[in-house]
Amino acid sequence: MILKHLKKYWHFALLASVFMILEVYVDLRQPRLMAEIVDQGILGLGNGGVSDIGIVTNTGIRMILIVIFGGICGILSNVCTNLCSQNFGNDIRKSAFRRIMHFSFSQTDDFSVGSLITRTTSDVTQVQNMVAQLIRGCVRCAMFFVAGSIALVSLAADFGTVILIAMPILLLEVGFVLWKTNPLFRLLQNRLDRMNTVIQENVAGARVVKAFVQEQRESERFAKSNDDLVSTQFRVLILMSYMRPVMNIILNIATIAIIRIGGLRVEDGSIAPGTVMAAITYLSQILNGMMMLAMIFQTVTRGITSSRRLREILDAEPPVQDGAREDIPAKFGSICFKNVSFSYPDNDAAVLRNISLDIRGGETLAIIGETGCGKSSLVNLIPRFYDATSGTVEVDGVDVREFKLHDLRDRIAVVLQKSELFTSTIRENIRIGNPEATDAEIEAAAAAAQADEFIRQQPDGYDTPVAESGMSLSGGQRQRIAITRALIRKAEILILDDSTSALDFRTEAALQSALREQYRDVTKIIIAQRISSVQNADRIAVLENGSIAACDTHENLLKSCKIYQDIYASQMRKEA
Amino acid sequence: MAEKYEAKSVQQGFRRGPGNFGAPVEKPQNAKKTIRRLLGYFRAEMPVVAVMSVTVLISVLASVFAPSFQSQAIDKIVSAEYGLLPRLLGIMLVLYIIHGVATLIQGYISASLSQRIVSRLRKELFDRIVHLPISYIDSHSHGDLISRMTNDADNISNIVSSSLSSLFSGVLMLIGTLAMMLHYSIPLGLLSCSTVILTVLFTSFISKHMRRFFVKRQALLGKLNGNVEEMVTNYKTITAYNRQEQVIDDFTETADQLTRTGIIAEIISNCMGPVMNMLSNVSFVIVSVFGAYFALKGYITVGVISAFIIYSKQFSRPINELAQLYGQIQTAIAGAERVFSILDTETEHFEGDALTDVKGVIEFRHINFSYVPEKRIITDFSLKIESGKRIALVGSTGSGKTTIINLLMRFYDPDSGEILLDGKNIRDIALGDLRDSVGIVLQDTKLFSDTIRANLTYAMSDYTEDELAAAAKSSHCDKIAAKLPDGFDTMLSQTSVSLSQGEQQLIAIGRAFLSYPRILILDEATSSVDTRTELSIQNAMNELMKDRTSLIIAHRLSTIQDADQIIVMDQGRIAEIGTHTELLKQGGKYYDLYMTQFAGQAI
């Protein structure tokens, strides 16, 4: 359970409760003092019916002092509650984030990026609010309720009847509203998500909408999601708006009953008029406590939904776990696929079938094949972004599952298909590959990646900030920054996953010759579409429908492999 | 005004997403004008507003008068006139029920009113946004635009639903209570007022100091949310490079800072309650002491004191509420200002001459263009494309190829020069007609979170299954669908269905094919698609575009070498024009590019 994170802060919770009890105690003392002021002071019941200013003043000062004490307790209780709930929330937020950062790729696919973001932000806040409410609200409610009832009944037993009748009605009402609104809240959240998606897609995809002149259709789509949202929101608001007036009516009727009963008791001389006023105050305290309970219920139900969502993260065990072996000596970056098959979770269709492939240390292996044939899936198995469904993948002669993940990934530098850039400077973006890299190393790597020149042309050179997801840079520039990032890693294996597609030929040729000359010992796996990108590789693996159709040099493949000949012809057709 | 606004929108870049935790108070810039405009939305709802005002009035009157009967009842108990009690209590009962019913109706009306208004506002806003020029969307933070649709519109709705009636009833309550107090006893009434003033002073003092922490907290929260968003989005890179620990450390630092600030902010704001409580008790004692004194002197009865105790509570509650409302209203008005500034942005003009029977002759005449004044992107670009021709644009990154497309689609308008379609200046053509005649596949593939079918038929609401099947086949989308659990009806938002870049491009191509355009534009549309698939798509395209015009941008020369005309661009100018063979013979830039690709790396 998520509340175990509270353990660390139990003393704050305890202190908060103690201060809260004192505060409520003072609140409960008040009506009695008020009654004393009215009965003894103003009405002068002990003074033969003449008002006694002395009693009013003395009791008044006593009351103010007590109230100040109560106020201080209230403030301290707040301080403790906040220390407890916010630190607790912070702990959860941090462990959730840590968890997410160590997720396996398949888990992130399952949760979706958007939901992970809301979980670490708004869900944590909901749980935090719930804890604060539980510490303060529950103690307060219970105190008001129990002590208020006792105080009220001790004034006159008959008053208890009023409570006994009013209470179940109130509970029924609160229960009804909660029962009705709860499912609506979830619906509301979904509809809000839907509307946000429509807005987001229209802003980000404005060009597509405009190019196909679909403004009208999008407006209608939005109108629908907006109407859905509004109608749900309306239902929630209506239900919530019942709560207050109905409660008020019950409260006020109870007050009238108290006055009526009080009148009868004063008539038969068993209580004083001031007692009636005290009773009214107690009653409103008890019933206000009930209203507070309704609010707490709401926060708690939301908090429970959120804590369930957080637990899904915190309890999720990454399917890709650290291996046990340490100190596996670094060799030359040899990679070996043995009978590897792979399919994504939740989709039975096999992506890779029985792949067996030996890659020598320092070799350059190119992979070429149709869109969707499993090229990326194949290289994703090396740094264990996913685990093979059957068969083994070995790096430096050891099964990748035996490595510590950190150690394994330190040997590999991957340039992803989509160049992911962070909002910081170009230099910082590159340094992600290797935080210890010196500026000279960064510049040398950038030169090899053909990035140095354009980076220097930026307004602040390497220290130019990269704007929102790198939109200020062209696709080719982003790819070259990502490649630089991989090169400074000095890993024994370099994987380029179709990450030169936006480079023009001249640039790519220069990059390739730099890789050949300066990174001779690094094992290079290059996924590409163009023959020119692969033809100089030591070997080229031709992937077709998840299997290796052939794996040989450019020249041999041209002679023997039909698929490769087709690919070649598709690019060289004028000459073919 | 406009420039001031720009600076502001940058600061608010991170206001997106759910959770406005204790939104900081913002100062609106021209409150009066904005309020007047906001009130305009109520004009159509006048009858409803009138009904609501009546119910508010009734409920306020009931809650002002009821305590006076309560005090009379207590008086009767004190003076032992028990017989009169039932009648007084009966009146109280009636008043309270009237009050309850009135607030019920009021709640219903304000809920429906607020939802109607916010729904209208959001629709207007969306219609605006969808018609905003691309230049506006390119130059503004997307997060900010989205936040205006959601956060700002919500703030306005909250103000309308909750605050409007409490504002109204608060003011009425204040006046009513004050009148009653003064009616019963002028000195005691004035005394109660003085304690209320104390409360007001205190509230404003605290909220002034609180604001600083809330603003800081909001900024940290924005930073944290942005941090999470970026790191989760880019988690692949973080994982691949073992940067998790560093990222977690950064996150922890921000999270801890946020918690520290949050604790201070919350503690200060939570102090309000107990301190208010103290103040209201002080006020009680003051009323009691002086009440007793006046009762002793015979100025007032004891029942009046009991009424005063209620009145002084009734008096301070609306004041506290109004103090809180003040901040909320300010935030909402600031939000309304942002919303209105979008509503005031000029949208694209759709009027123009209708286009019929497009031939697809495109002519650029002496086009000059720059996105920012100093940096010229296109210089004196002139080109005539005959109908039914296949034109390719090549050139290095930044040479202005995509800009030419932007101009042709009128996403941007040139600084000087003109573009003609079938001899007509495209500025004079109805925008919808112009874009309808063009099918485009963009560099950055954007698909909608809907089924593959819906994405393919995006531009065609009336399609036959045969047309869909044909377009899917020629764009190889049928192969993608075949691999997915629900075929064409697979939802793309489902995360287990993650398509590769190449597959996404294929769907975008299918989308353009199905719209069967007069002019087809492919902007690096097949960069992630393998060349064999590309070749078969091109063959299909040749068939489809037989006597139609197409414009292709690509790095891969194999993609373009069949073109009727190849335009080599360099720094916004046309460097070379010709067919593949002509250009090769010329031995210029195109020849260089070709040699690097096809002659291998043996340079």
Image (spheres, coloured by chain):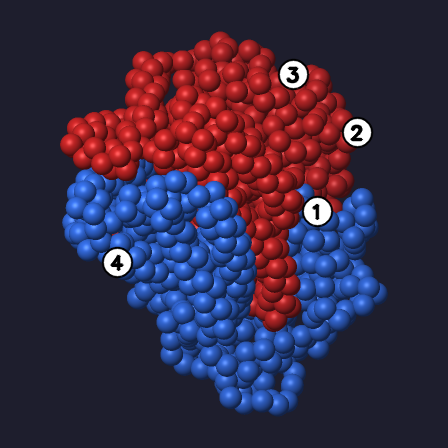
Q: Are marks 3 and 4 on the same chain?
A: no
Report the residue marked by disc 1: B593
Residue A519 appears in the rendering: yes
Question: Closest to the observer: A258 or B379?
Answer: A258
Mark-to-mark CA distance, 1 and 2: 30 Å
Q: What x and y, as percent, mark residue A206? A: 50, 33
Furthest residue toward front: A48
Q: Disc 4 marks which amino acid?
A: Ser
Where disc 3 sits, the SS reads strand
Q: Disc 1 marks which amino acid?
A: Leu
Query: A360 left or right of A4?
Result: right
- The numbered mark, 3 or 2, whose residue comes first in the sequence reads 2
The chain to which mark 2 is attached is B
- The numbered mark, 3 or 1, whose residue comes first in the sequence reads 3
Q: What x and y, as percent, mark residue B165? A: 39, 27
> In the image, which disc is placed on residue A154?
4
Where disc 1 sits, the SS reads helix
Which of label 3 and label 1 is nearer to you?
A: 3
Q: Disc 3 marks which amino acid?
A: Glu
In the figure, residue B484 lies in which quadrant?
bottom left
